[in-house]
Protein backbone atom coordinates (compact mmCIF):
# COMPACT_ATOMS: atom_id res chain seq x y z
CA UNK A 1 0.00 0.00 0.00
CA UNK A 2 1.22 3.51 -0.81
CA UNK A 3 1.06 6.53 1.48
CA UNK A 4 -1.54 8.05 -0.86
CA UNK A 5 -3.84 5.03 -0.59
CA UNK A 6 -3.47 4.85 3.19
CA UNK A 7 -4.25 8.55 3.49
CA UNK A 8 -7.41 8.11 1.42
CA UNK A 9 -8.47 5.14 3.55
CA UNK A 10 -7.95 7.01 6.82
CA UNK A 11 -9.70 10.13 5.54
CA UNK A 12 -12.73 8.04 4.62
CA UNK A 13 -13.21 6.88 8.22
CA UNK A 14 -16.23 8.52 9.95
CA UNK A 15 -14.79 10.82 12.63
CA UNK A 16 -18.07 10.75 14.57
CA UNK A 17 -18.09 6.95 14.80
CA UNK A 18 -17.72 5.79 18.44
CA UNK A 19 -15.04 3.30 17.37
CA UNK A 20 -13.16 5.79 15.17
CA UNK A 21 -9.83 5.43 17.01
CA UNK A 22 -10.04 1.63 16.87
CA UNK A 23 -10.75 1.71 13.13
CA UNK A 24 -7.93 4.23 12.56
CA UNK A 25 -5.31 2.22 14.45
CA UNK A 26 -6.39 -1.11 12.90
CA UNK A 27 -6.18 0.32 9.38
CA UNK A 28 -2.85 1.97 10.13
CA UNK A 29 -1.20 -1.17 11.50
CA UNK A 30 -2.53 -3.29 8.64
CA UNK A 31 -1.17 -0.86 6.06
CA UNK A 32 2.18 -0.58 7.86
CA UNK A 33 2.54 -4.36 7.81
CA UNK A 34 1.70 -4.55 4.12
CA UNK A 35 4.12 -1.74 3.24
CA UNK A 36 6.86 -3.16 5.52
CA UNK A 37 7.21 0.12 7.39
CA UNK A 38 9.67 0.06 10.27
CA UNK A 39 8.30 3.05 12.24
CA UNK A 40 5.14 5.10 12.52
CA UNK A 41 5.26 8.71 13.75
CA UNK A 42 2.05 10.34 14.98
CA UNK A 43 2.82 13.95 15.84
CA UNK A 44 0.15 16.43 16.95
CA UNK A 45 0.59 20.00 15.76
CA UNK A 46 -1.28 23.26 15.40
CA UNK A 47 -2.80 22.10 12.12
CA UNK A 48 -3.69 18.56 13.16
CA UNK A 49 -2.23 15.11 13.69
CA UNK A 50 0.60 14.47 11.22
CA UNK A 51 1.19 10.83 10.32
CA UNK A 52 4.51 9.69 8.83
CA UNK A 53 5.95 6.25 8.24
CA UNK A 54 9.50 5.11 7.64
CA UNK A 55 10.03 2.94 4.58
CA UNK A 56 13.51 1.59 3.86
CA UNK A 57 14.96 4.04 6.35
CA UNK A 58 13.32 7.19 4.93
CA UNK A 59 10.44 9.06 6.61
CA UNK A 60 7.48 9.81 4.34
CA UNK A 61 4.43 11.93 5.13
CA UNK A 62 1.15 10.01 4.91
CA UNK A 63 -1.20 12.84 5.80
CA UNK A 64 -2.59 15.26 8.39
CA UNK A 65 -5.81 14.50 10.30
CA UNK A 66 -8.15 16.59 12.47
CA UNK A 67 -6.65 17.87 15.70
CA UNK A 68 -9.55 16.47 17.72
CA UNK A 69 -8.72 12.86 16.80
CA UNK A 70 -5.10 12.95 18.01
CA UNK A 71 -5.81 12.18 21.71
CA UNK A 72 -8.19 9.34 20.73
CA UNK A 73 -5.72 7.65 18.40
CA UNK A 74 -2.79 7.90 20.82
CA UNK A 75 -5.00 6.70 23.68
CA UNK A 76 -6.00 3.65 21.61
CA UNK A 77 -2.35 2.78 21.04
CA UNK A 78 -1.67 3.19 24.77
CA UNK A 79 -4.54 0.83 25.62
CA UNK A 80 -3.03 -1.82 23.33
CA UNK A 81 0.35 -1.32 25.02
CA UNK A 82 -1.08 -1.43 28.57
CA UNK A 83 0.09 2.12 29.28
CA UNK A 84 -1.60 4.69 31.51
CA UNK A 85 -4.02 6.57 29.28
CA UNK A 86 -4.62 9.30 31.86
CA UNK A 87 -0.91 10.17 32.12
CA UNK A 88 -0.25 12.45 29.17
CA UNK A 89 2.40 14.54 30.91
CA UNK A 90 5.21 11.94 31.11
CA UNK A 91 6.95 9.74 28.54
CA UNK A 92 5.83 6.09 28.48
CA UNK A 93 6.96 3.00 26.66
CA UNK A 94 5.40 -0.41 26.17
CA UNK A 95 4.84 -3.40 23.92
CA UNK A 96 1.67 -3.96 21.94
CA UNK A 97 0.37 -7.50 22.03
CA UNK A 98 -2.80 -7.89 19.99
CA UNK A 99 -4.58 -11.27 20.42
CA UNK A 100 -4.65 -13.23 17.16
CA UNK A 101 -8.46 -13.23 17.08
CA UNK A 102 -8.46 -9.43 17.09
CA UNK A 103 -5.43 -8.88 14.91
CA UNK A 104 -5.87 -6.07 12.39
CA UNK A 105 -3.51 -7.85 9.98
CA UNK A 106 -5.63 -10.89 9.15
CA UNK A 107 -4.05 -14.32 9.05
CA UNK A 108 -0.47 -13.12 8.73
CA UNK A 109 2.09 -13.70 11.49
CA UNK A 110 1.67 -11.19 14.33
CA UNK A 111 3.83 -8.14 14.51
CA UNK A 112 6.07 -7.23 17.42
CA UNK A 113 5.24 -3.61 18.20
CA UNK A 114 6.90 -1.16 20.58
CA UNK A 115 5.14 2.08 21.47
CA UNK A 116 6.86 5.18 22.82
CA UNK A 117 4.92 8.29 23.81
CA UNK A 118 6.30 11.73 24.62
CA UNK A 119 4.54 14.94 25.75
CA UNK A 120 4.85 17.87 23.32
CA UNK A 121 3.43 21.37 23.02
CA UNK A 122 0.30 20.17 21.19
CA UNK A 123 -0.19 16.83 22.94
CA UNK A 124 1.40 13.41 23.05
CA UNK A 125 3.58 12.29 20.18
CA UNK A 126 3.56 8.54 19.58
CA UNK A 127 6.18 6.48 17.75
CA UNK A 128 5.51 2.83 16.95
CA UNK A 129 8.42 0.55 16.05
CA UNK A 130 7.40 -2.52 14.06
CA UNK A 131 9.35 -5.77 13.95
CA UNK A 132 8.22 -8.15 11.22
CA UNK A 133 8.13 -11.94 11.35
CA UNK A 134 10.95 -12.00 8.82
CA UNK A 135 13.17 -9.96 11.13
CA UNK A 136 12.50 -12.36 14.00
CA UNK A 137 13.84 -15.28 11.97
CA UNK A 138 17.11 -13.74 10.77
CA UNK A 139 20.33 -15.63 11.33
CA UNK A 140 23.89 -14.65 10.50
CA UNK A 141 23.69 -15.99 6.94
CA UNK A 142 20.54 -13.92 6.31
CA UNK A 143 22.20 -10.56 6.94
CA UNK A 144 23.90 -10.33 3.52
CA UNK A 145 27.20 -9.42 5.11
CA UNK A 146 30.27 -9.45 2.85
CA UNK A 147 31.52 -13.04 2.65
CA UNK A 148 34.87 -12.36 4.33
CA UNK A 149 33.30 -10.36 7.15
CA UNK A 150 30.54 -12.93 7.73
CA UNK A 151 33.12 -15.73 7.89
CA UNK A 152 35.24 -13.80 10.41
CA UNK A 153 32.24 -12.97 12.58
CA UNK A 154 31.10 -16.59 12.42
CA UNK A 155 34.53 -17.74 13.63
CA UNK A 156 34.48 -15.29 16.53
CA UNK A 157 31.10 -16.62 17.69
CA UNK A 158 32.88 -19.90 18.41
CA UNK A 159 34.96 -18.20 21.10
CA UNK A 160 34.16 -18.86 24.75
CA UNK A 161 35.09 -15.40 26.03
CA UNK A 162 35.51 -11.86 24.78
CA UNK A 163 33.20 -9.09 23.60
CA UNK A 164 31.79 -8.46 20.14
CA UNK A 165 30.52 -4.91 19.76
CA UNK A 166 28.04 -4.05 17.00
CA UNK A 167 28.14 -0.33 16.39
CA UNK A 168 26.52 2.30 14.21
CA UNK A 169 24.06 5.18 14.43
CA UNK A 170 20.40 4.79 15.39
CA UNK A 171 18.43 2.80 12.86
CA UNK A 172 21.42 1.00 11.38
CA UNK A 173 20.22 -2.50 12.29
CA UNK A 174 22.52 -3.10 15.25
CA UNK A 175 19.94 -5.00 17.30
CA UNK A 176 18.95 -7.11 14.29
CA UNK A 177 22.58 -8.18 13.87
CA UNK A 178 22.98 -8.87 17.60
CA UNK A 179 19.83 -11.00 17.62
CA UNK A 180 21.04 -12.85 14.52
CA UNK A 181 24.26 -13.71 16.36
CA UNK A 182 22.24 -15.07 19.29
CA UNK A 183 20.08 -17.15 16.97
CA UNK A 184 23.23 -18.45 15.31
CA UNK A 185 24.63 -19.54 18.67
CA UNK A 186 21.31 -21.13 19.61
CA UNK A 187 21.27 -23.07 16.32
CA UNK A 188 24.85 -24.25 16.83
CA UNK A 189 24.60 -25.31 20.46
CA UNK A 190 20.91 -25.83 21.21
CA UNK A 191 20.42 -26.12 24.97
CA UNK A 192 24.12 -26.82 25.48
CA UNK A 193 24.96 -23.18 26.29
CA UNK A 194 23.27 -20.77 28.66
CA UNK A 195 22.23 -17.71 26.64
CA UNK A 196 20.97 -14.67 28.56
CA UNK A 197 20.27 -11.01 27.86
CA UNK A 198 19.70 -7.73 29.67
CA UNK A 199 17.95 -5.21 27.42
CA UNK A 200 16.24 -1.83 27.45
CA UNK A 201 13.78 -2.64 26.00
CA UNK A 202 13.39 -6.23 24.78
CA UNK A 203 12.62 -5.77 21.10
CA UNK A 204 11.94 -9.35 19.96
CA UNK A 205 11.39 -12.54 21.98
CA UNK A 206 14.14 -15.07 21.25
CA UNK A 207 13.38 -18.75 21.94
CA UNK A 208 16.05 -20.38 24.10
CA UNK A 209 17.35 -17.07 25.48
CA UNK A 210 16.57 -15.91 29.03
CA UNK A 211 15.77 -12.26 28.29
CA UNK A 212 15.43 -9.60 30.98
CA UNK A 213 14.33 -5.99 30.69
CA UNK A 214 15.67 -3.21 32.87
CA UNK A 215 13.32 -1.20 35.04
CA UNK A 216 14.98 1.98 36.21
CA UNK A 217 11.87 2.99 38.18
CA UNK A 218 12.80 0.33 40.76
CA UNK A 219 16.56 0.81 40.47
CA UNK A 220 17.09 -2.10 38.10
CA UNK A 221 19.41 -0.52 35.52
CA UNK A 222 21.76 -2.11 32.99
CA UNK A 223 24.84 -2.02 35.19
CA UNK A 224 23.04 -3.52 38.19
CA UNK A 225 21.27 -6.10 36.04
CA UNK A 226 24.55 -7.14 34.49
CA UNK A 227 26.17 -7.67 37.88
CA UNK A 228 23.34 -9.94 39.02
CA UNK A 229 23.20 -11.68 35.65
CA UNK A 230 26.76 -12.86 36.16
CA UNK A 231 25.46 -14.99 39.05
CA UNK A 232 23.12 -16.85 36.69
CA UNK A 233 25.91 -19.05 35.31
CA UNK A 234 25.81 -17.41 31.86
CA UNK A 235 28.02 -18.43 28.96
CA UNK A 236 26.75 -15.99 26.34
CA UNK A 237 25.40 -12.57 27.34
CA UNK A 238 23.65 -9.97 25.23
CA UNK A 239 23.77 -6.46 26.67
CA UNK A 240 21.18 -4.43 24.78
CA UNK A 241 23.32 -1.30 24.56
CA UNK A 242 26.42 0.09 26.26
CA UNK A 243 25.46 3.63 27.27
CA UNK A 244 27.84 4.52 30.08
CA UNK A 245 31.22 3.73 31.56
CA UNK A 246 29.80 1.58 34.38
CA UNK A 247 28.03 -0.75 31.95
CA UNK A 248 31.09 -0.84 29.67
CA UNK A 249 33.41 -1.81 32.51
CA UNK A 250 31.07 -4.59 33.66
CA UNK A 251 30.75 -5.88 30.11
CA UNK A 252 34.50 -6.00 29.47
CA UNK A 253 35.24 -7.55 32.84
CA UNK A 254 32.71 -10.27 32.01
CA UNK A 255 34.40 -10.72 28.64
CA UNK A 256 37.73 -11.26 30.38
CA UNK A 257 36.36 -13.80 32.85
CA UNK A 258 35.04 -16.54 30.60
CA UNK A 259 31.90 -15.07 29.02
CA UNK A 260 31.09 -14.34 25.39
CA UNK A 261 29.50 -10.87 25.42
CA UNK A 262 27.47 -9.31 22.61
CA UNK A 263 26.46 -5.68 22.78
CA UNK A 264 25.57 -2.63 20.71
CA UNK A 265 27.14 0.80 20.89
CA UNK A 266 26.54 4.10 19.12
CA UNK A 267 29.55 5.10 17.02
CA UNK A 268 30.23 6.48 13.56
CA UNK A 269 32.85 3.89 12.66
CA UNK A 270 34.54 0.84 14.12
CA UNK A 271 37.63 2.85 15.01
CA UNK A 272 35.69 5.78 16.45
CA UNK A 273 34.00 3.28 18.81
CA UNK A 274 37.44 2.65 20.30
CA UNK A 275 37.97 6.39 20.66
CA UNK A 276 34.61 6.85 22.37
CA UNK A 277 35.32 4.05 24.85
CA UNK A 278 38.73 5.50 25.66
CA UNK A 279 37.04 8.86 26.29
CA UNK A 280 34.73 7.05 28.72
CA UNK A 281 37.93 6.17 30.64
CA UNK A 282 37.79 2.47 29.80
CA UNK A 283 41.27 1.09 30.36
CA UNK A 284 43.11 0.40 27.07
CA UNK A 285 44.04 -3.13 28.18
CA UNK A 286 40.32 -3.96 28.54
CA UNK A 287 39.74 -2.92 24.92
CA UNK A 288 42.80 -4.69 23.56
CA UNK A 289 42.34 -7.93 25.47
CA UNK A 290 38.60 -8.02 26.15
CA UNK A 291 37.17 -7.09 22.74
CA UNK A 292 37.19 -9.77 20.05
CA UNK A 293 35.87 -7.49 17.32
CA UNK A 294 34.04 -4.26 16.62
CA UNK A 295 31.56 -4.28 13.76
CA UNK A 296 30.26 -1.00 12.36
CA UNK A 297 27.30 -1.01 10.02
CA UNK A 298 24.87 1.07 7.99
CA UNK A 299 21.78 0.29 5.92
CA UNK A 300 21.49 1.60 2.36
CA UNK A 301 18.43 1.28 0.15
CA UNK A 302 18.53 -1.32 -2.62
CA UNK A 303 17.81 -0.18 -6.17
CA UNK A 304 14.59 -1.46 -7.68
CA UNK A 305 14.72 -3.52 -10.88
CA UNK A 306 13.61 -0.42 -12.76
CA UNK A 307 17.01 1.26 -12.14
CA UNK A 308 18.84 2.53 -15.21
CA UNK A 309 22.59 2.58 -15.90
CA UNK A 310 24.40 5.84 -15.21
CA UNK A 311 25.77 7.62 -18.29
CA UNK A 312 29.20 9.11 -18.92
CA UNK A 313 27.82 12.61 -18.43
CA UNK A 314 26.35 11.74 -15.02
CA UNK A 315 28.49 11.75 -11.91
CA UNK A 316 29.16 8.95 -9.43
CA UNK A 317 29.48 11.64 -6.74
CA UNK A 318 33.17 11.06 -6.29
CA UNK A 319 32.89 7.34 -5.55
CA UNK A 320 35.75 5.22 -6.95
CA UNK A 321 33.54 3.16 -9.28
CA UNK A 322 33.67 2.41 -13.01
CA UNK A 323 29.94 1.84 -13.42
CA UNK A 324 26.84 2.69 -11.46
CA UNK A 325 23.05 2.68 -11.69
CA UNK A 326 20.49 5.33 -10.80
CA UNK A 327 16.95 5.11 -9.38
CA UNK A 328 14.07 5.61 -11.75
CA UNK A 329 10.77 4.69 -10.08
CA UNK A 330 7.87 2.37 -10.91
CA UNK A 331 4.74 0.96 -9.28
CA UNK A 332 6.71 -1.87 -7.66
CA UNK A 333 8.88 0.57 -5.69
CA UNK A 334 6.11 3.15 -5.12
CA UNK A 335 8.00 5.50 -7.48
CA UNK A 336 10.95 5.78 -5.08
CA UNK A 337 13.42 3.76 -7.15
CA UNK A 338 14.31 1.56 -4.16
CA UNK A 339 13.00 -1.64 -2.58
CA UNK A 340 14.47 -3.06 0.63
CA UNK A 341 17.87 -2.33 2.15
CA UNK A 342 21.38 -3.75 2.07
CA UNK A 343 23.96 -3.89 4.84
CA UNK A 344 27.26 -2.01 4.63
CA UNK A 345 29.67 -3.16 7.34
CA UNK A 346 33.29 -3.02 8.47
CA UNK A 347 35.11 -5.00 11.16
CA UNK A 348 38.25 -4.42 13.21
CA UNK A 349 40.01 -6.68 15.72
CA UNK A 350 41.51 -4.62 18.58
CA UNK A 351 43.74 -7.58 19.47
CA UNK A 352 45.69 -7.26 16.19
CA UNK A 353 49.23 -6.41 17.29
CA UNK A 354 49.57 -3.19 15.30
CA UNK A 355 46.14 -1.81 16.21
CA UNK A 356 46.45 -3.06 19.80
CA UNK A 357 49.70 -1.16 20.23
CA UNK A 358 47.94 2.05 19.20
CA UNK A 359 45.11 1.41 21.64
CA UNK A 360 47.53 0.83 24.52
CA UNK A 361 49.27 4.09 23.59
CA UNK A 362 45.90 5.91 23.58
CA UNK A 363 46.50 7.23 20.06
CA UNK A 364 43.90 9.48 18.47
CA UNK A 365 41.23 8.18 16.10
CA UNK A 366 43.06 9.26 12.93
CA UNK A 367 46.17 7.29 13.85
CA UNK A 368 44.13 4.28 14.97
CA UNK A 369 42.27 4.39 11.66
CA UNK A 370 45.56 4.34 9.77
CA UNK A 371 46.72 1.36 11.84
CA UNK A 372 43.42 -0.46 11.18
CA UNK A 373 43.90 -0.03 7.44
CA UNK A 374 47.44 -1.35 7.74
CA UNK A 375 45.90 -4.40 9.45
CA UNK A 376 43.70 -4.95 6.39
CA UNK A 377 40.53 -3.03 7.23
CA UNK A 378 38.10 -2.81 4.31
CA UNK A 379 36.15 0.21 5.49
CA UNK A 380 32.50 1.15 5.03
CA UNK A 381 33.22 3.44 2.07
CA UNK A 382 34.99 0.66 0.18
CA UNK A 383 32.17 -1.76 0.98
CA UNK A 384 29.58 0.77 -0.20
CA UNK A 385 31.50 1.46 -3.42
CA UNK A 386 31.50 -2.28 -4.14
CA UNK A 387 27.70 -2.34 -3.79
CA UNK A 388 27.42 0.59 -6.20
CA UNK A 389 29.67 -1.19 -8.69
CA UNK A 390 27.39 -4.25 -8.49
CA UNK A 391 24.26 -2.16 -9.06
CA UNK A 392 22.87 -2.92 -5.59
CA UNK A 393 22.58 0.73 -4.58
CA UNK A 394 23.24 4.15 -6.04
CA UNK A 395 25.91 6.81 -5.47
CA UNK A 396 23.34 9.27 -4.14
CA UNK A 397 22.11 6.71 -1.59
CA UNK A 398 25.66 6.09 -0.38
CA UNK A 399 26.18 9.82 0.06
CA UNK A 400 22.86 10.15 1.89
CA UNK A 401 23.84 7.46 4.40
CA UNK A 402 27.63 7.76 4.68
CA UNK A 403 28.31 11.34 3.62
CA UNK A 404 31.63 12.01 1.88
CA UNK A 405 34.75 9.92 2.29
CA UNK A 406 37.42 11.53 4.48
CA UNK A 407 39.98 13.14 2.19
CA UNK A 408 37.65 13.36 -0.81
CA UNK A 409 37.39 16.60 -2.77
CA UNK A 410 33.99 17.41 -1.30
CA UNK A 411 35.26 16.68 2.20
CA UNK A 412 38.23 19.00 1.78
CA UNK A 413 36.11 21.78 0.28
CA UNK A 414 33.56 21.41 3.09
Image: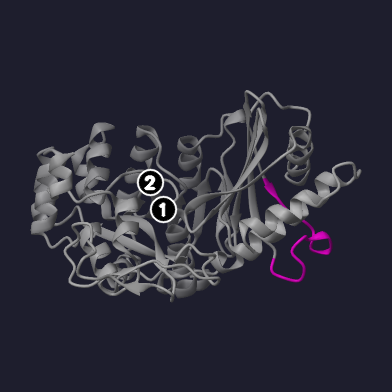
Residue 336 position in % (x across, y down): 48, 62
Q: How crowded is the residue under tag 2: few (<14 C-alpha within 10 Å), some, or many (20+)?
A: some
Q: Is residue 39 magenta?
A: no
Towards the viewer: 186 or 105: 105
Residue drawn at x 56%, y 34% as measured from the top left: 220
Q: Secondary structure at mark 2?
A: loop
Is the residue 332 above or below the residue 110 in the image?
A: below
Residue 26 position in % (x across, y down): 77, 54
Is the residue 227 above or below the residue 381 in the image?
A: above
- Indicate left or right for 84 with 335 as reference: right
Q: Is residue 101 magenta?
A: yes
Residue 58 position in % (x across, y down): 48, 52
Could you say which quadrant of the image residue 68 lies in? top right
Residue drawn at x 43%, y 46% as measured from the top left: 170
- Indicate left or right for 28 with 37 as reference: right
Q: Which residue is mark 1?
A: 172
Which stretch appears magenta?
Answer: 95-109
- Magenta residues, dominant SS class: loop
Residue drawn at x 51%, y 68% as measured from the top left: 333
Q: How crowded is the residue under tag 1: few (<14 C-alpha within 10 Å), some, or many (20+)?
A: many
Q: Secondary structure at mark 1?
A: loop
The answer to whether the residue labelled 1 contacts the one labelled 2, judged by CB atoms less than 8 Å apart, is: yes
Q: Which residue is mark 2?
A: 169
Q: What distance separates the C-alpha of mark 1 from that of mark 2?
A: 6 Å
Say if residue 161 shows up in the picture: no
Towards the viewer: 201 or 74: 74
Amino acid sequence: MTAKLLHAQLQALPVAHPEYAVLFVDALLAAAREARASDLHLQPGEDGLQLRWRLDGVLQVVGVYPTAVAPQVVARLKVLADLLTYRTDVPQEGRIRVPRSKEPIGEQSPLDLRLSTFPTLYGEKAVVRLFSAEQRLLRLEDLSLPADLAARLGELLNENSGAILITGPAGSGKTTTAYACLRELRARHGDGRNLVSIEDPIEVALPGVAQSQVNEHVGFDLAQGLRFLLRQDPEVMLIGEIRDAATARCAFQAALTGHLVLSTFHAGSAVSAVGRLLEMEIEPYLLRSGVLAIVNQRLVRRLCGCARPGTETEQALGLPVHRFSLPQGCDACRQTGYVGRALVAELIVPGDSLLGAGILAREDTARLDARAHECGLVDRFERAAALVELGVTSPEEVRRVLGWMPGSAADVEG
